[in-house]
Image (cartoon, helix red, strand yellow):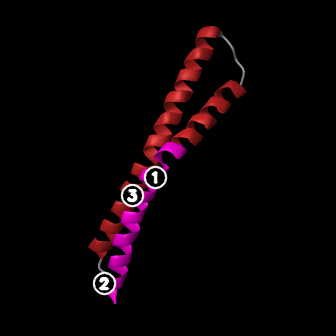
Amino acid sequence: MDQTEIIELVREAILISLRLGAPVMLIGLVVGVTIALFQALTQIQEITLVFVPKILAIFLAIFVFFPGMVSILTVFMESLADRIIGLQ
């Protein structure tokens, strides 16, 4: 395995981690901004009002996107196992 293959593998791993984390993080961002806007408009400064809806939204997003995440990781691990087998 030479340097270009290692760089390609690391690049692919970083892109997959972005593909897995981006939807969940974007949902958390949208919920957080929405709650912050609601707090600014109503002047309610309850700290738990931010965390509870954001946690629930992130758990729901993980639950919804989990099958797609598993399929992406399965494809990546199969290609990685094929590369490992090809080294020997």
Disc 1 marks which amino acid?
A: Pro
x then y, percent, for residue 52: 67, 31
Q: Is residue 84 left or right of residue 30?
A: left
x then y, percent, for residue 19: 39, 50
Say which residue label 3 marks: 72
Q: Are marks 1 and 2 in contact (CB under 8 Å)?
A: no
Q: Residue at x 37, y 65 (%)?
A: 76
Asked if 78 appears above or below 56 in the picture, the reply is: below
Q: Residue at x 49, y 50 (%)?
A: 66
The question of residue 59 being in magenta is answered with: no
Depth order, front residue of 5/61:
61
Q: Which residues are magenta?
A: 62-88
Q: Is residue 30 left or right of residue 85?
A: right
Q: Earlier in the sequence, mark 2 or mark 3?
A: 3
Question: What kind of secondary structure does the magenta stretch mostly adopt?
Answer: helix
How far is the residue under mark 1 from the one under mark 2? 29 Å
Quadrant containing the C terminus is bottom left
* Label ID, residue 67: 1
x then y, percent, for residue 54: 60, 33
Secondary element at tag 2: helix
Q: How many marks?
A: 3
